Image: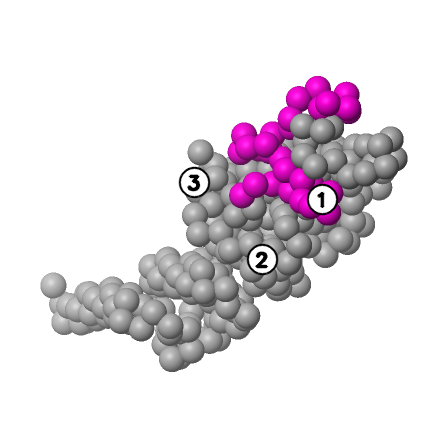
Amino acid sequence: MNRSRTVTMTAGILLVACLAGSAAVLSRIDRLRTGATLEDVLFVSSPKAVKRMSLGYDGLLADIYWTRAVQYFGGRHEARASHYRLLAPLLAITTTLDPHLDVAYEFGANFLSPQPPNGAGMPDQATQLVEYGIRNNPDNWKLYYELGFIYYMDTKDYERAADAFLRGSKTPNAHPFLKVMAAQMAQHAGDTQMARALWTTTYQSSQEKQIRGNAVAHLRALQIADDVTALQELVGQYGQKTGQLPRSMADLVAANLLPAIPLDPSGRPYKLSPEGLVEVQVPDDFPFIEKGAPAGYKPPAPKNLEELGK
């Protein structure tokens, strides 16, 4: 073995050891300083600079930065933080190092786009991330779906959502639903039926437990929204018929307005507040509900969406 080859191999081994050591040190910092935010450990924020420094170990370094992004988001999410300043830079570094790391686009967009407390509230950065993913993985239909999903759910830009779905429908092995979504967007934009179809497709097309759990949680919230709307209308009918508010769901059953006391998606009966408002019994079970929670209720940040998918 000549001298230059020995030097190269030694340098490579030392680099791998340093990278592994860096990951261990960062993990140790997290355990010792649970309130740390990464500002004091993310010394290089330029994706291109990090790639130049990787010396060919792009994949390994991408995995490290992806792990940091997940830890950063998870820690701040659980703490109900008001900002996620480093999330977009961490994701940009990760995907620059490995442009084909699909999970970084799929999960990263889900971290960035939703409004707090369920996400970072950065839909523009999320669409930029996914568009970068599409440029590097043009045949991955799931990225077009993710892009259309963000435009539809988070920015309410239905024209761009339709365009994203249409682009995705032309990729190899694209899910047939993309073409349907593009065609029906103008007619059903903004309604519950469309939102339910999107979350159902998300559940069916992903094997990731966290994404499936997130989809289930949103589908339950949509079901509650439909139930509460319908039940609230019956409460109004009862008031018009009797001149007073019902005291419970049993009053609606007695008035032949309901065949039985209705149940929420967890199997618990819906209840009525003293003001005649329809509510779920345990709102903490439904992290994304917009209807059915008591006035002034603030939902906790979901801690384990994987469990919701079971």
Pick the front one: 105 or 208: 208
Dot 2 crowding, Cα within 10 Å, few <14, some 14–19, many 20+:
few
Q: Nearer the viewer, mark 1 or mark 2?
A: 1
Q: Decide which of tag 3 and tag 2 comes sooner along the chain.
A: 2
Q: Is residue 138 magenta?
A: no
Q: Which mark is residue 277?
A: 1
Give the main secondary structure, helix, strand or loop, of the magenta stretch.
loop
Q: Decide which of tag 3 and tag 1 comes sooner along the chain.
A: 1
- The amino acid on which the numbered mark 3 sits, given as a three-letter code, is Glu
Is 246 on the left-hand or right-hand side of 137?
A: right
Pick the front one: 306 or 51: 306
Quadrant hosting residue 65? bottom left
- The amino acid on which the numbered mark 1 sits, given as a three-letter code, is Leu
Q: Give the secondary structure at mark 3.
A: helix
Pick the front one: 151 or 136: 151
Q: Which region is colored magenta? A: 253-282
From the image, tell me which residue sits under label 3: 307
Image point (34%, 69%), residue name: 34
Quadrant hosting residue 56? bottom left
Can you say which quadrant of the picture contains the N terminus? bottom left
**Where in the figure is residue 149, as x and y percent of width and height?**
66, 47
Q: Which mark is residue 229?
A: none
Q: Nearer the viewer, mark 3 or mark 1?
A: 1
- The amino acid on which the numbered mark 2 sits, given as a three-letter code, is Lys
Is 186 on the left-hand or right-hand side of 96?
A: right
Q: Which mark is residue 298?
A: 2
